[in-house]
Amino acid sequence: MSLISGLDDKACVLICGASRGIGLALCNALARREDVDQLIAVSRHATQNPALRALADANPNRILLVDCDAREEASLAAMAAQAGERCAHLHVVISTLGILHQENARAEKSLAQLDLASLHASFTTNAFAPILLLKHLLPLLRKQPATFAALSARVGSISDNRLGGWYSYRASKSALNQLLHTASIELKRLNPNATVLALHPGTTDTELSRPFQGNVPEGKLFETTFAAQCIVELIGRLGPSVTGSFWGWDGRNIPW
């Protein structure tokens, strides 16, 4: 399967949030593909990450490590300039940015647990950082087939919300979905061969989910390698005809 619809050549790929979890698994998976020419791995401390360093050393001249705090626009702008020096066009960009219960964010169970700091932290990382990533990489997505995918979450679906709780996380993922859908409309005008996707990777064994894994049904907690495989397969299958849509790891469309 081609990495994305309509791509006949080797791809330039950028992963933001590359240093751990699903992001690192995606880097490992994509580095093994012969149809990936260049892989740009972005995280706050990418150049100091042992796993990314080992991957770059094993793939000389194919992998670029870029330090970037996606919560800061100046850092995003500098990263985009570095990416542009390596690749004139990006065929695939995947954002794995997200927090639930760290860096001032909280998985609130009630209104009484809400506070401004938690709301701000959740929205900054879960919604604002991915869409600003797209903003700064837009010049590199305008000429050829391109897919921008960001990891969302099923709990961001308003119509699927039957349990309540997790106010900041749910709302920030809902905001991300709206931002991506809106951006897909603009990007389609600029590049009819572009696709923007919100993807739910399933509950994956990462730092984000570990405090809550006791409630996950048997067989529904995925390894990061499996989640990465599902994401790559979705990106390969979903093209411009469904841009601006929301999909689960199992290939099913998720209601807003």
Image: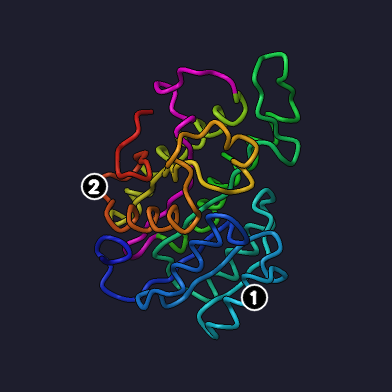
Q: Quadrant of residue 236?
A: bottom left
Instruction: Say whether residue 197 is magenta.
Output: no
Residue drawn where x is 64% and y is 20% of the image: 109
SS class of the residue under badge 2? Answer: helix
Picture coordinates of residue 27, whole percent (x, y)? 51, 66
Picture coordinates of residue 99, whole percent (x, y)? 63, 41
Q: Do the residues labelled 1 and 2 touch (CB within 8 Å)?
A: no
SS class of the residue under badge 1? Answer: helix
State the residue in front, 229 or 91. 229
Quadrant, the N terminus: bottom left
Above-or-below relation of 11 to 118: below
Instruction: Say whether residue 164 is magenta.
Output: yes
Left or right for 50, reference 89: right
Please rate how many residues cluster around mark 1, counting C-alpha atoms within 10 Å: few if below 14, some from 14 to 19, many from 20: some
Q: Give the range drawn in magenta.
A: 142-165
Q: Residue furthest bottom?
A: 60
Q: Residue furthest front?
A: 218
Please rate how many residues cluster around mark 2, counting C-alpha atoms within 10 Å: few if below 14, some from 14 to 19, many from 20: few
Above-or-below relation of 147 to 243: below
The tally of labels here is 2
Residue drawn where x is 53% and y is 55% of the image: 22
- Residue 53: which disc? 1
Quadrant, the C terminus: top left
Residue drawn where x is 71% and y is 20% of the image: 114
Q: Which of marks 1 and 2 is in front?
A: 1
- Please give the residue where the numbered disc 2 appears in the rendered image: 241
Q: At label 1, which amino acid type do we have?
A: Arg
N-terminal of the two: label 1 or label 2? 1
